[in-house]
Image: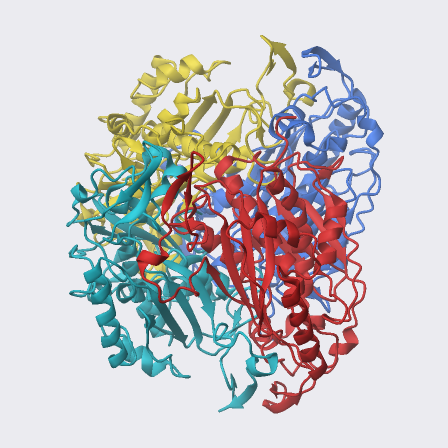
Chain colours: A yellow, B blue, C red, D cyan
Amino acid sequence: MKNSFGNNVILTLFGESHGPAVGAVIDGLSPGIPVDESFIAFQLDLRRPLDGLGTARRERDRFSIVSGVYRGLTTGAPLCVMIPNEDARSGDYAGLEDLPRPGHADYAARCRYGGFRDPRGGGRFSGRLTAPIVAAGAVVIPALRAKGILIGTHILRCGGMADRPFAEDPAADIDALSRRPFAVLDEAAGEAMGRRIRQAAEKGDSVGGVLETAVVGLPAGVGEPWFDTVEGSLSHALFSIPAVKGVQFGAAFDMADAPGSSFNDPFHVENGRVVTATNHNGGVNGGLTNGMPVVFRCMVKPTPSIRLPQRTVDLGRMEDATLELSGRHDPCILPRARVVADSVTALVLCDLLTGRYGADYLGGAGQ
Amino acid sequence: MKNSFGNNVILTLFGESHGPAVGAVIDGLSPGIPVDESFIAFQLDLRRPLDGLGTARRERDRFSIVSGVYRGLTTGAPLCVMIPNEDARSGDYAGLEDLPRPGHADYAARCRYGGFRDPRGGGRFSGRLTAPIVAAGAVVIPALRAKGILIGTHILRCGGMADRPFAEDPAADIDALSRRPFAVLDEAAGEAMGRRIRQAAEKGDSVGGVLETAVVGLPAGVGEPWFDTVEGSLSHALFSIPAVKGVQFGAAFDMADAPGSSFNDPFHVENGRVVTATNHNGGVNGGLTNGMPVVFRCMVKPTPSIRLPQRTVDLGRMEDATLELSGRHDPCILPRARVVADSVTALVLCDLLTGRYGADYLGGAGQ
Amino acid sequence: MKNSFGNNVILTLFGESHGPAVGAVIDGLSPGIPVDESFIAFQLDLRRPLDGLGTARRERDRFSIVSGVYRGLTTGAPLCVMIPNEDARSGDYAGLEDLPRPGHADYAARCRYGGFRDPRGGGRFSGRLTAPIVAAGAVVIPALRAKGILIGTHILRCGGMADRPFAEDPAADIDALSRRPFAVLDEAAGEAMGRRIRQAAEKGDSVGGVLETAVVGLPAGVGEPWFDTVEGSLSHALFSIPAVKGVQFGAAFDMADAPGSSFNDPFHVENGRVVTATNHNGGVNGGLTNGMPVVFRCMVKPTPSIRLPQRTVDLGRMEDATLELSGRHDPCILPRARVVADSVTALVLCDLLTGRYGADYLGGAGQ
Amino acid sequence: MKNSFGNNVILTLFGESHGPAVGAVIDGLSPGIPVDESFIAFQLDLRRPLDGLGTARRERDRFSIVSGVYRGLTTGAPLCVMIPNEDARSGDYAGLEDLPRPGHADYAARCRYGGFRDPRGGGRFSGRLTAPIVAAGAVVIPALRAKGILIGTHILRCGGMADRPFAEDPAADIDALSRRPFAVLDEAAGEAMGRRIRQAAEKGDSVGGVLETAVVGLPAGVGEPWFDTVEGSLSHALFSIPAVKGVQFGAAFDMADAPGSSFNDPFHVENGRVVTATNHNGGVNGGLTNGMPVVFRCMVKPTPSIRLPQRTVDLGRMEDATLELSGRHDPCILPRARVVADSVTALVLCDLLTGRYGADYLGGAGQ
């Protein structure tokens, strides 16, 4: 599938950082999903850099829906959303084609595409490509919400500072996050993170961290045991979020040394429903949802584009060289990545739910 | 795809723990790959429980190749390998259908499949299904080796004990591991792990840990930027290994708080080849291989089937209950899972390489 | 996908004509479908050669279900069915490896697989591979019937002799065909066809013809406009039936010169239901079912394996040569192919219906 | 996959007849393919209606390439091409939502999408969607030509008039067709067809016919035996061309009653190459190319949108009704469909060739 994911709801991504536009096609949407353009704009806003915490590139993200929507509702045909690139400064990249940036895709991409790729602004590998993912996610997030399925992501760790983890029932936390531009549960932790990001920016350096995502309201019994597990399907797509280098479900890392007797989540009956007393498995057993919140973490490396001088090679001369980047870069991707994580999660879940419950599941089939 | 993975080399898995056999079909193999049945047997041996460290179930794993091989070479047609189940004791599971095991798939599977699933021995969710994965992997591992691509996995952490990580150039470590039934680099660490596993077994409990896998010899420029990244493609399949709850590439966790200036891997020229001085990115940039070793870790939770009494629910009566398991279970899955990780990795890489270089890449097209 | 088809219900085929067995894996079946082994045997019987009308190879087709069924019902896990090859005589093919049979896959296969393919009995290209397709079809045909969806195929034309076409409402015809070993609606036409087949066999020659298939009871609105149309999805799989060289829906050929005013099927209301007065479109408009019977025809070329001397080349010496085949061959594939057409049709429809209505659609989810 | 086709080169189609634009994304293109915008414009011109022979709707088809091309060459990233809709007159369709056009998708689409589809101008089901298919085809046709692979389509039959079939070696015919706006080999036949089309148009009626396509220069051994055969892969996509109701390869229909001894194509050696004396199999044996020209025919029904009064139903009142269409319609789709057939064929072949020979096959990897 290459630049797509999904079996029943399929996202295909196109565009480059400095081309005329970036965009996405979502195929397999149920007909009758209300499309709220102001919510798409709101979500794209969450992805935009915060003052002092992100790149100086300022895109207005004036998206347009090219297909698949009629009278404000999805039709069931592929929905194409386009976002023009308006503030591209390709000159910033002049002279760097032969100097691959450490930690970046430049060198690997040259091995993959020969001399043919578009290098401007990172081309195909730019974080700019996450904008249409967010727009696509904003089409389906309200449809999931209408089914009682809520998704939220916060910055659990950033530059050495820690937020508190999600509460056992994350519904209230998700609700609070949906209104916060800087996604933390503990606002004091967020301020400390902001200071670390600004310090890194001043030095021309960058910081990474950890995102934590929670989903509540999923029915039990969604997913496949081999190989389209909930974990495998989500991670397949999540690893495309630039800088994500690890994905873990539940408490795997915190409890690496715990015995099975502590890690297993005992079942009990609560108000006539089967629930677990703890959620160390992150809501997934045997690749299937078990009805508890699905909780996972994405490890995000520090953004590779930094202004500090770095050692690299000159690929033309095949000799060692030093790289000093100018250009506009994010010292930390986490504040912007949280809405990307929400969006990817929403799209993967729509795919799994549509496969399980049929092509009309998310829409207004009753009309 | 559900019970399959891959675009060009595709594995499809079938069978249940206590059915007549488990098996796999591999489609898309290049014609002309030598199939070494003694190596398949050797790899299946690595998956079998070690004395005192695993389940008492003893399967001889007498596999047979049903199709796709002629005169000892792959033909290019689907290769089906079958492994009969010979030591199933379904009686051990009698009376447990209504008592889902905590941490196990039982409850989620009932929500997915209604009352129709085969519950004997975990049915479709049993680790027994990894046997045909190992047999399939053993078909392609030598073909990768013939291309200079080597794969190895060791137990980095188990029950609180740590092995040393892979050396910067893991080739020698991979070679050593290929001959060790208990996969550690530091044999003293292995003995300590063995003691912890036996202690857990005596208590009727279980332990988990971390596997570390390394791949050397991959060409640079394999993978896709969105969404069939190397990380996403590998993790999609790795999360199907029972008990794997996290996958991370490179040094993401060890260096969570490091700045970009430390995390980025500087390039330099060495013997006319572009290499990096460090490998914090685990051999993958922008979703593509960069020619350095691909290194990743799988977090493995403690096996959920334990003999200690556990709280659960009686799904027939919808009331709380206590579960006391007898049956034969692994107190720790790590010693057996290492060869499964190698096999899954090999199959995913064959898929990516075949897509990149064509249908004859791994075989003997020159004949 | 190569040796598989389907998005939600996926058939994967394996085996060779003279290997130990042929088989299929069906993934994505709803849980709770009753599996009737005597019906599988009955359908496999329909595929066996009739006395004097087919090959002398006599396979008992003693299938076994390896996975995916528990207590007589599908579990929702992949169902693997295996059929051993018991009457293979590979000696019949000795000395023919360098002499490709005209009209057969031999030469093309050598170009595709080099010298590595299994040539015995046609190997992977043998009609023997249709046996597991029939077994797989026999699992789902009763599940469709339980939904009111009936499928039948007859020999519309064979060796120059014509059967009458399906009645406007083909339900009674389908019912009659289900009990006839030689699938014609007009038994006198069938006797004439039988004579032609025997005449061809006596001369060492072969004959072809046309199969006509009808499906009643499909809901309207199944399929996709681009590109998983009902026509495209069916034809994709139908062209794999050996010797099928054309697929047409409705009256395309009979009415090639008719104007739109005759070809369009006018709608009217009948008993509160929308129906069409004619069915020239074969039950499909814009790639979607319209609720009328789906009717299509497969053009079947004369079987290429004939005993008459034929011109070919010696690929070893690269010079012209003459081929005289002995061995056991079918002078006409149509009598055996009708149940293969039914089976392929059933599997494709299950795939489309499961994608449309969800993973439990065909099973017993209510249990 | 729904609105996409291909495994390695994948086309995804979006847009509606009266939406802002129609477009396509092609993923999996080799890097380094020269993109000739004037050839794209030339091919789009071939698809535009000829005076008096097609709809009065006049689209300028001012396409733009949104992504995947840099400095005139493909980059290997998804190529998105967009074509605005400029001459849509949605008023023509007012009042017709409840009156499904006979032979058209209207009724089936309502059953599939409920009341949510975009009905204007046929919406998703309009022939307008073939414009981006032609643009996408125009990207890859020159890349195939650079490999010696030539594709051409002519109108074999139209409104009862017949063109001569392709010559045994169709290369010269293909070359001649590439310059003819009305695609016939015998220009007198073309004039007769034109008269029939105009007669039908005057009566408010329409005519159909048969397209014949030939491909020369394909290597032998491309395709899969089950189920991604050359025939199955091509037909899957060809059936999406609006009004195509049948696809046949080689001489299946002309020789329906011929014995195997006439139909089989004898091999012989010619200039050191294996060729066949005849090509009744249309260049495909066992699902694989055999090195001879691939030749197939598409049966095209008369266009369903006609001005003559037709019987239909009023879906609001559920009673019989009469439909009188105004609007702008094609009395015959064949003159415009020939370039669509070429384009679909080119895209399917790129997919098969890229799967066989790797991701760089069609591009300029040597640069």
Quadrant for residue D323, please give it.
top left
Counting every numbered tag in the picture gives: 0
In front of the other: B347 or D218: D218
- Residue B20 percent across, percent down from the top left: 79, 44
Q: In which quarter of the image is the C terminus of chain B?
A: bottom right
B151 or D328: nearer the eye? D328
* Occupied quadrant, residue C3: bottom right
> Which quarter of the image is occupied by the N terminus of chain B?
top right
- Percent position of residue A76, x then y: 36, 38
* Horizontal side, residue A283 vs residue A27: left or right: right
Q: In which quarter of the image is residue C114?
A: bottom right
Determine whether A150 is above or below C357 in the image: above
Q: Is residue C199 left or right of residue B85?
A: left
**Residue A74, percent from left and from top:** 32, 34
Q: Residue at x 49, y 27 (%)?
A: A296
In the rendered view, tell whether residue A225 sits above or below residue A189: below
Q: Please state which of residues C249 and A359 is positioned toward the viewer in this rendering.
A: C249
Q: Can residue D331 be seen in this view?
A: yes
